């Protein structure tokens, strides 16, 4: 395509200003495209042990978000509702303003929930939760012991002063 100089810049700017996901926002209901790659859970230590999801098993919708934010939140369809059809698990994600970010986060959450649903207590998510609870209880126990030692030490100091 041969476009003269000044018009070429405006032609390029028109392409930059039009986001590729805009048609998805305008529709009430949109299903995931098969060409969209499934994203792994970022930042998770054992994300490879989680069960994988295929796009054919997922039903994706973009709905209007709710919560604080007023008109800006009420008029954009950037809330992602993702359903895993075989298990019936539904995840709703409206953590960011970006549709793409919400899609990634929704898939991470759904992947963890599906893993927990099918594996139960053998799930990595369940094991991590139990380990964090155990760590929290241990920290609480140590703090209680430390408080008792401090009380005992203060009592000993007061007895020595008398």
Image (tube, helix red, strand yellow):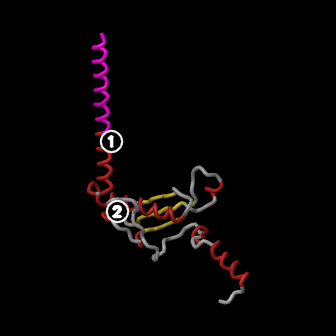
Tell me the SS state at disc 2: helix
Residue 8 screen position, x and y as percent: 69, 82
- Name the residue at the top extreme: 162
Of residues 3 and 77, which is closer to you in this image?
3
Point 31% across, 23% down: residue: 151
Image quadrant of residue 114?
A: bottom left
Work out which quarter of the rendered image holds the N terminus and state it: bottom right
Q: Which residue is depicted at the point 30% across and 44% down?
A: 135
Residue 136: percent from left, percent from top = 32, 42
Residue 47: which numbered mark, if any? Answer: 2
The disc, 2 or 1, on the residue closer to the chain's N-terminal end is 2
Q: Could you tell me how many numbered marks the image carries?
A: 2
Q: Is residue 140 above or below residue 96?
A: above
Expressed as whole percent of the image width and height from the top left, the position of residue 146 reads 30, 30
Side of 8 relative to 54 (left or right): right
**SS class of the residue under badge 1?**
helix
Q: Quadrant of residue 27?
A: bottom right
Q: Residue at x 53, y 58 (%)?
A: 96
**Residue tagged 1:** 136
Examine the rendering and report whether any part of residue 13 can be seen. Answer: yes
**Nearer the observer, 28 or 100:** 100
Q: Circles 2 and 1: CB distance less than 8 Å? A: no
Horizontal side of residue 24 vs 48, given as left or right:
right
Q: Which mark is residue 12?
A: none
Give the extent of the magenta segment: 139-162
Asked whether residue 88 appears in the rendered view, the answer is no
């Amino acid at each position: 395509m041969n476009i003269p100089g000044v018009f070429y810049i405006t032609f390029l700017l028109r392409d930059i200003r039009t986001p590729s996901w805009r048609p998805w926002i305008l529709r009430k209901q949109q299903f995931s495209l098969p060409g969209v790659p499934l994203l792994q859970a970022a930042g998770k230590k054992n994300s490879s042990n989680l069960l994988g999801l295929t796009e054919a098993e997922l039903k994706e919708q973009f709905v209007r978000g709710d919560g604080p934010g007023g008109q800006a939140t009420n008029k954009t369809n950037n809330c992602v509702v993702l359903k895993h059809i075989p298990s019936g698990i539904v995840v709703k994600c409206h953590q960011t303003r970006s549709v793409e970010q919400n899609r990634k986060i929704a898939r991470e959450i759904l992947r963890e929930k599906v893993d927990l649903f099918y594996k139960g207590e053998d799930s990595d998510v369940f094991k991590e939760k139990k380990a964090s609870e155990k760590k929290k209880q241990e920290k609480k126990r140590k703090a209680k012991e430390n408080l008792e030692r401090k009380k005992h030490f203060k009592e000993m100091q007061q007895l020595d002063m008398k």
